Image (cartoon, grey):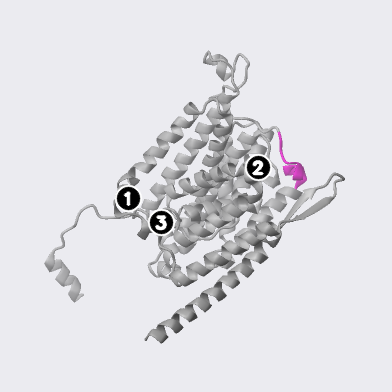
Amino acid sequence: MAQEGNSTRQRDFAGALKHAALAALIAFGLFSLLVGIRTDTGSGGALELTARYEMLAAFVAVAFIGAFLREFLFAGATFDAASYVPAALRGFAARIAPFLGPAFLIVALAVPIIFYDNRYILDLSIQILTYVMLGWGLNIVVGLAGLLDLGYVAFYAVGAYSYALLAQNFDLSFWICLPLAGILAAFWGILLGFPVLRLRGDYLAIVTLAFGEIIRLVLLNWQSLTGGPNGISSIPRPSFFGLPFNSDEGGFAHTFGLEFSPTHRVVFLYYVILVLALITNAVTIRLRRLPIGRAWEALREDEIACRSLGINTTNTKLTAFAIGAMFGGFAGSFFATRQGFISPESFVFQESALVLAIVVLGGMGSQIGVAIAATVMLGGFEFFREFQQYRMVVFGLAMVAIMIWRPRGLISTRVPSVFLTKEKPVDIALAREEGRG
């Protein structure tokens, strides 16, 4: 028995060593150019390469040791982070979970008051809320309906360019252009939905990715309408019920007897995107409780079973694409009026990947999870801005770690869309008659 145990341990050690060597080889291939070589611009403008063998060796060693310990000690088992959390802490988290939403709302309402003099925090908060709104819109398509969409940035671009062109060419206000931009984005969502009705999985992802690139290339080459690579500038700013945010006599500050400050417009934009995000959240929650929301979730779980129940999968997919695209168009319209300038470079595939990562990281179908993920990711990007050359490496490692420890996202539990508040008594005679039938 002792010899069998020793031989088993030797096999485990050899297998762990082999697994660790493979992980180290992969790490070497990945980091040899990312970490092992640094590029600088020389005094004459020429590109200079500096080798960093020590740092490359450190990354490879960490990969080797980590893979070896995981394979040898845990036998390749998935690490369950929840089992290491004390029961008392889990109970406390379950008790405060219903209050997280109201707490986040109170904090969001108080941000402009607390950080009124900090323009950096206000701009970062506006950016986070924009991505929260985009995440909630994509959550309808990916999280609820289960349709993998890699071209969501196309609807974001349609909303932005729709507002810019309508506001400049027809002199329409932001509040009139906002619903029009959402309607146009929803129309393009329906156009995308028709060709992909019979596609699923990887094939659906490829087609949506191509759709996003087609929209970007059209915006880039249709110079007579979109300005091409030069984009559209001097986009009109929103006003407060017709009161512009300037120092004139008819402006917002003069009307309310305030001293003019550029921060007034920033605070107004913050509350506009906050209201738009809250409307997106409320509509999504309401739709999820309606028959169309339950049809989305049925489609996500099993499309064949969904059809067998008599659900029209065509209408179900088209409504998911249209409503998700509409919210993306709203966010794009706000982006255009906030920036005052848009170009095709603002709507590249990386934006779709970032929004999709927010949805997956937060937990597909979880509203509060998407909000937390957007805050963590956008805030993390700014936190590591000083370490720009290591920022993407740290971000990638964090994503891999979360996918291993929390494969269903940060918030993996969702409240059922339909549940019984009380038991309904059933007549025994009626049950017997049904049983005979």
Q: Considering only order in the chain, which callout, 3 or 1, is on the residue closer to the N terminus?
A: 1
- Mark 2 burial class by Cα count in 10 Å: few <14, some 14-19, many 20+: many
Residue at 46% in and 63% down: 313
Residue placed under numbered mark 3 in the picture: 412
In the image as oriented, which residue stretches furthest toward the front?
2
Q: Nearer the viewer, residue 72 or 85?
A: 72
Q: For the magenta stretch, what is the residue range?
A: 222-233
Q: Given the image, on which type of amino acid does mark 1 rest?
A: Leu
Disc 1: CA contacts within 10 A as few (<14), some (14-19) or many (>=20)? few
Image quadrant holding the C terminus, namely bottom left
- Please tell me whether residue 134 belongs to the stretch shown in magenta: no
* Amino acid at circle 2: Tyr
Q: Secondary structure at mark 3?
A: loop
Q: Earlier in the sequence, mark 3 or mark 2?
A: 2
Q: Toward which corner of the image does residue 64 lie, by quadrant?
A: bottom right
- At which x and y percent is residue 292? 41, 55
Q: Nearer the viewer, mark 3 or mark 2?
A: 3
| Most foreground residue, 287 or 33 | 33
Residue 76 visible in the shown view: no
- Apparent side of residue 313 relative to residue 392 in the rendered image (left or right): left
Separation of residues labelled 3 and 2 (CA atoms): 36 Å
**Where residue 170 appears, x then y in whole percent?**
66, 33
Q: Nearer the viewer, residue 35 or 11?
A: 11
> At 66% from the left edge and 51% from the top edge, which residue is drawn?
348
Q: Circles 2 and 1: CB distance less than 8 Å?
A: no
Q: Which amino acid type is shown beneath numbered disc 3?
A: Ser
Name the image quarter holding residue 297. bottom left
Residue 89 image label: 1
The numbered mark at residue 161 is: 2
Residue 198: horizontal and vertical position, in percent? 54, 67
Q: Are marks 1 and 3 in contact (CB under 8 Å)?
A: no
